[in-house]
Image (cartoon, rainbow, N blue to C red):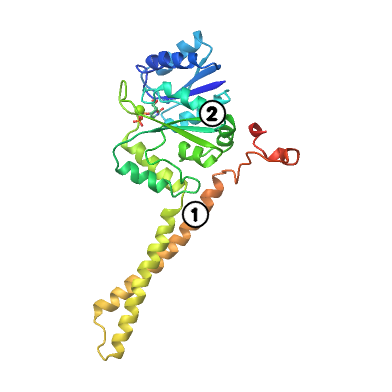
Amino acid sequence: MLSIITPAYNEVLNLPILRERLATVLGGLSVEWEWIIIDDGSRDGTYALICQWAATDRRIRGARLSRNYGSHSALTCGMGLARGEGIVSLAADLQDPPEIICELYELWRIGAKVVWAVPQRDHTGLHTIFYSLLRRGDGLADHPLSGSGFVLIDRAVAEVLNAAEERNSNLFARIRLAGFSQDSVSYRKAKRNHGRSGWTQRKKLKLALDSLTGFDHALVRSMTYLGFLVAAVGFSMAIYVVALFFTGQPPTGWASIMTAILLLGGVQMIFLGVLGEYAWRTLDETRDRPLFVVEAATDVEETDDKLCPRCL
Ligand code: UDP
Ligand code: MG
């Protein structure tokens, strides 16, 4: 069974069109399917529509979140409800063409555990800078610079994600981090059908910060490096000031004050970095991510309990 999960925030105009296109696409695949729509605190009757559909079509299910939590939380909720062996995330606004699901499905059927639909993007800019920074994180080196688009994941991967509840995180980066065999197809992202994007600048900034602080401690470490740099400049100046003493020309006020400022500033930054390293480790520990995920083992009997249940 294939589960399609759609987070929906004020999408009452888009959902009926998506329903038709989705039914055509899924009807063409010889697979049982369900469509789970998570209303992320909409104010336009999205949930009433979901209820109405669910009452007449058993393949459609849904839930309503108590307020607007953001699409990653809505997707996480849907993953918990999904019964399928494969789970696809799909936006409600028809920017992710449902027809691509066939390509994702084919690659999944021949063995990939995660299949990405990667948007083709012509422009570069902030977006590219963000993804190149994100790629520095452990296990994220293959992240495409054009972003994530949407994705099909195998139940084995969903179980890894469901096992740990992460706050302030990025679901798509977590899927990359989960590992397993990952493949991708590329697609052209369509224009939004009706309404406005629910991703305000504020939400995007939050996701960027969550992603950059959640998967790599480069920000913390850069403080330590900067500290060493400033301290090195301060130290060189200290040598210069001492040397001036010996040449019989005592240093002027400026040089000694700068030396003290740079040295002290450097030392403070180094120790802020050190504190940051401890804070990062505490954060990492509390996040409860699995230390490793065993996908397969030759000695199944022995390692049974360590394998993720779906990989057996
Ligand atoms: N969405 C959501 N909660 C939000 C924002 C968006 O559930 O707070 C849903 C939205 O209804 C859509 C998907 O997430 O199905 C992608 O969001 P959107 O199209 O608004 O963002 P963009 O395409 O601009 O990234
Ligand atoms: Mg959109």
Q: Identify residue for label 1.
A: 279
For label 1, the SS is helix
Instruction: Say left or right for 179 vs 216.
Output: right
Q: Name the outermost residue toward the right.
A: 301
For label 2, the SS is helix
Where residue 67 sits, quadrant-wise, is: top left
Where residue 13 sits, quadrant-wise, is: top left
Up the image or down, 242 lies above or below 229; here it is below
Residue 42 x %, y %: 39, 23
Residue 216 x %, y %: 46, 50
Q: Identify residue for label 2.
A: 108
Q: Name the outermost residue toward the front.
A: 110
Three-letter code for the amino acid on which mark 2 is drawn: Trp
Q: Nearer the viewer, residue 304 or 60?
A: 304
Up the image or down, 174 lies above or below 43; here it is below
The N terminus lies in quadrant: top right
x 47%, y 47%: residue:
215
Residue 178 x %, y %: 54, 40
Q: Nearer the viewer, mark 2 or mark 1?
A: 2
The answer as to whether callout 1 falls within 8 Å of ligand 1 is no
Quarter for ligand 1?
A: top left
For residue 82, the mark is none
- How far is disc 2 from disc 1 in space, using C-alphas? 39 Å
The answer as to whether callout 2 falls within 8 Å of ligand 1 is no
Q: Is residue 265 visible?
A: no
Instruction: Say left or right for 98 vs 295.
Output: left
Residue 172 x %, y %: 46, 36
The count of marks equals 2
